[in-house]
Amino acid sequence: MILFEDDHLLVVNKPADLVCHPTKDGPLSSLIARVRTHLGNDEGRLVNRLDRETSGVVLIAKGAVVAAELGRVIAATALKRYWAIVEGHLRDAPLHITAALGKDESSPVAIKDCVREDGAAAETSVRLLHRFVRNGAPFSLAEVTPLTGRKHQIRIHLAHAGFPIVGDKLYGADEQRYLRLVERRLTDEDRQALRLNSHALHARRLSFEWRGQAWQFQAEPDEAFLGFMRGT
C-alpha cells in the first residue's frame, strides 16, 4: 500500500510475509521487485528494511543521490516507533532494555542472534499501550522505540525481558519452529501455539528531518494484527 509518493520518495506500508530483498520467484515476490515494477525502472532503493514478517513503513528513494542522503539521516537521527503484541502483561512504567547483542553460537539457526556481553551495544524503549486477555492468556500491546539499530533488536530484547512477540518463530518459545517453517514442516500444533501466521511486529511510524523539512509517515497494522487485539 502506497502511503506517499513524489519525485524523490516512495513510502509504502509493507505487508507481513514479504521479503524486502530480491528473490528468484518472480516480479512480485519481494518488496524491491514490486517497487521497481511500480516505478518502471531499477532506480528504486530501499532506505530502511524490515524483516520478512514485520509489516509497516518502508522508505524508498528514487535514485542514488537521495538514497545516500536519506540513508545517513535514517541511520543517525530518525525516530522509529513500532507496535508489538507481546505475551504477558507489561507494567505501567516504561521499560528500558539495555543489552548487547551478537551471534547466538549455540543455535542451529544461522541467522539467530542473542544477548551476550561481548556483543554490540543495543538499547530499546518500551511503553505499554494496552493490556488484554485472550483465551485466558495475558497479552500487551506495546509501543517500542529502538534507540540503536541492531539486527532483530526489538524481537531479541522483548524476549530477553520476558515478553516475546506473539507469533515469533525464532525468538519465541521454540526456535525449532523457525526451522520447521523454512523446511515447510510447520505443524497444526505449531500454528496453534504461534497464534498468528506472522509475528506481531509493525513499524508504525517513521519521523525525520531532511532538506530543511520535517517528515513523518504512519501506517496502520493489518487486520490479523488488529483482529488479535479485538479477539475477532
Image (tube, rainbow, N blue to C red):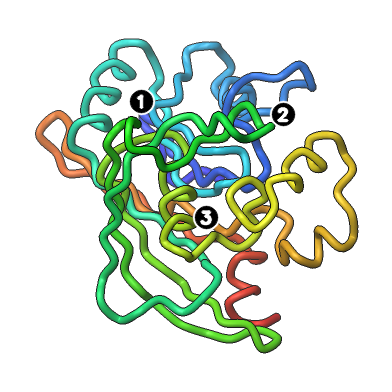
Q: What is the CA distance from the residue labelled 2 to the residue labelled 3? A: 22 Å
Q: Amino acid at mark 2?
A: Leu
User: Whole-percent x and y of residue 138?
Assistant: 56, 82
**Secondary structure state at the residue bearing disc 2:** loop
Q: What is the CA distance from the residue labelled 3 to the residue labelled 1? A: 30 Å
Residue for point 44% across, 61% down: 83
User: Whole-percent x and y of residue 139?
Assistant: 54, 77
**Secondary structure state at the residue bearing disc 1:** loop
Comparing marks 2 and 3, which lies closer to the viewer? Answer: 3
User: Whole-percent x and y of residue 23?
Assistant: 70, 19
Q: What is the CA distance from the residue labelled 2 to the residue labelled 1? A: 23 Å
Residue for point 35% across, 79% down: 91
Q: Amino acid at mark 3?
A: Leu
Residue occupied by mark 3: 201
**Secondary structure state at the residue bearing disc 3:** strand
Residue occupied by mark 2: 28
Examine the rendered structure and indicate whether residue 147 appears above or below residue 60.
below
Comparing marks 3 and 1, which lies closer to the viewer? Answer: 3
Judging depth in this view, the residue of 72 and 197 nearest the camera is 197
Residue for point 55% across, 60% down: 165
Ranked by sequence position, the earlier of labels 2 and 3 is: 2
Tell me where residue 191 sits by quadrant: bottom right
Instruction: Say whether marks 2 and 3 touch (CB < 8 Å).
Output: no
Q: Amino acid at mark 1?
A: Asp
> From the image, which quarter does the C terminus lie in?
bottom right
